[in-house]
Image (tube, grey):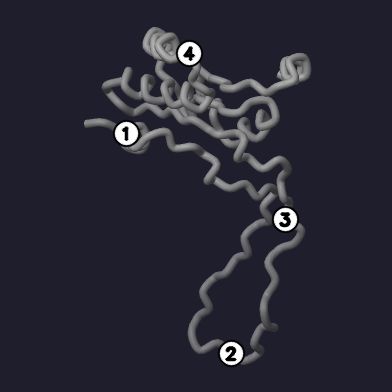
């Protein structure tokens, strides 16, 4: 993909994954400089994959769609093609992905020294959170439509 973007001088509008487990935040982060959007599944996909006939018919009817709009079509058509439900498909706006991770530099610190007097009640366990290796907002996931979100988040009856 680096060769393509170097040779064309631009990023890919939409990178589509008709494969299992490809539209995850780790993969999106690695592709952020090469594409504007990515569309695919975060889970395993049924063997039939995308409904290319309806997606390409929509693109032929509106060839000026940008990557975001075409990705939304893929999500909508994919969800609609599986009447049994239980499938996932999402569109990510890679332009919203941070350009560099913000590593955590230290563990959380105690705000005051521990008390030396015996506790009056058993203390609740408080374990510090491990340092984050990357601070990446979840908000850069683009919700394409209320219909596709409800279809993705809960199985159909």
In the rendered structure, find residue 118 and report the number of the disc placed on it: 2
Q: 157 left or right of 135?
A: left
The answer for how far apart the CA atoms under marks 3 and 1 are is 37 Å
Q: Is mark 4 on a helix, strand or loop?
A: loop
CB under 8 Å between callouts 1 and 2? no
Look at mark 4 in the image and give the residue it sits on: 63
Q: How crowded is mark 2: few (under 14 residues within 10 Å), some or many (20 or more)?
A: few
Q: Name the residue under label 3.
A: 104
- The mark lying in front, picked from 4 and 2, is 4
Visible in this render: residue 123? yes
Residue 59 drawn at (x, y percent): 44, 13
The residues bearing labels 3 and 4 have C-alpha atoms spaced at a distance of 44 Å
Q: Name the residue: 48% across, 84% down.
A: 121
Front tag of 3 and 2: 3
The residue singled out by tag 1 in the image is: 147
Circles 3 and 4 in contact, beta carbons < 8 Å:
no
């Amino acid at each position: 993909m680096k060769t393509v973007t170097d040779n064309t001088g631009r990023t890919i509008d939409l990178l589509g994954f008709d494969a299992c487990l490809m539209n995850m935040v780790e993969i999106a982060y690695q592709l952020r400089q090469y594409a504007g959007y990515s569309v695919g599944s975060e889970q395993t996909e049924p063997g039939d994959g995308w409904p290319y006939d309806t997606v390409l018919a929509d693109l032929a009817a509106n060839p000026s769609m940008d990557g975001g709009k075409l990705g939304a079509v893929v999500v909508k058509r994919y969800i609609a093609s599986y009447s049994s439900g239980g499938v996932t498909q999402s569109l990510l706006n890679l332009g919203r992905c941070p350009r560099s991770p913000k590593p955590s530099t230290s563990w959380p610190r105690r705000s005051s020294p521990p008390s030396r007097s015996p506790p009056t009640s058993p203390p609740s366990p408080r374990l510090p959170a491990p340092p984050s290796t990357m601070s990446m907002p979840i908000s850069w996931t683009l919700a394409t439509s209320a219909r596709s979100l409800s279809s993705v988040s809960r199985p159909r009856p």
